[in-house]
Image (spheres, grey):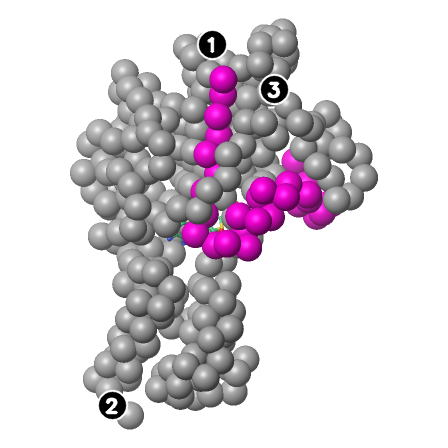
Amino acid sequence: MTAEQDERAFRALTQKVSAARGLRCEAYKEKCLRRRLAVRMRARGVHTFEAYSRLLDEDTSEYDRLLDALTINVTKFWRNAATWQALTDPYLRELWRARRGGVRAWSAGCASGEEPYTVAVALAEVARALGEEAVFATAEARIDATDVDRESLERTAAAQFPDSAFAEMPADLARRYFTAVAPRRPLPVLQRLVRVRRHDLTREPPPEPPYDLIVCRNVVIYFDRPMQERLFSAFADALVPGGILLLGKVETLFGPARERLTLEDPRERIYRRPA
Ligand SMILES: C[S@@+](CC[C@H](N)C(=O)[O-])C[C@H]1O[C@@H](n2cnc3c(N)ncnc32)[C@H](O)[C@@H]1O
């Protein structure tokens, strides 16, 4: 097969997957797509894109397995501990004060829920440090937890976590905010803040702007450059003046949004929309 034929077969296949499952495959990096397709093709013992395309027709459950492979769902509570420390004080503390507790946050690409619950814990810790636990219990804070992957959303909504999810979280925080025995559950005071919904970052505008805090970590890394640029601009639009954007450790803001958001902490990838 020539490189041209391979490219044509690859395009035809990704278009078919996009049309069948409403996921914009074109927005993902081609290398990433090819690697994930190769994983599924190996698993099913087929060697060409055409053969895999036929297999999808014969066994539509393979679409689910392919989408699972495409949406990599690795996550942890308090992932990159130093980042959450830096975010909590001073940034979350300032937002908490400015909003009198009513902080509106969005965890975009939340996987199985560890990230939105990390935001909830960080907010609870800010309140505790200020002696405002009672305010926290009734605060109108909200954390929108969104993902494109249905299974991830079900797990976020179920909010039952294995011990392994806590590997990076300081033990005292895990003890303070979660039940003791696995599967461990966040306390109701945290659960009431998290709202779970399906949302595709490649196709939909931000769910309920404006936000004081947008956390989008280890997601845009899978998207191609034009998609990343569009998303960064959408995040800048969706933030209130003074609002914070947190990206993943290896993700960097670029494009027009770079002019609109200031880099507050280069190491931890914390950006702010000027007030
Ligand atoms: C590696 S996980 C990151 C989880 C979490 N943000 C963290 O850093 O621990 C990537 C997540 O992005 C989600 N994702 C991939 N494509 C997406 C899209 N188009 N829209 C929304 N979420 C998407 C995946 O389903 C997956 O849950």
* Left/right of residue 130 with respect to residue 264 in the rendered view: right
Which residue in the protein does label 3 denote? 125
Give residue 100's mark.
Answer: 1
Q: Name the residue located 29 percent from the left edge and 50 percent from the top edge.
A: 203
Residue 47, percent across and down? 43, 88
Q: Name the residue located 37 percent from the left edge and 26 percent from the top edge.
A: 211
Residue 201, percent across and down? 35, 47
Q: Is residue 269 located in the magenta-colored stretch of the structure?
A: no
| Number of other residues with Cα within 10 Å of mark 3, as a class: few under 14, some 14 to 19, many 20 or more | many
| Outermost residue to the top | 131
Is there a contact, CB below 8 Å, between mark 1 and mark 3? Answer: no
Which residue in the protein does label 2 denote? 2
Residue 199, percent across and down? 40, 46
Q: Is residue 264 visible?
A: no
Disc 2 marks a residue whose amino acid type is: Thr
Q: Name the residue located 45 percent from the left edge and 20 percent from the top edge.
A: 103
Is there a contact, CB below 8 Å, between mark 2 and mark 3? Answer: no
Q: Earlier in the sequence, mark 1 or mark 2?
A: 2
Residue 243, percent across and down? 35, 23
Q: Earlier in the sequence, mark 2 or mark 3?
A: 2
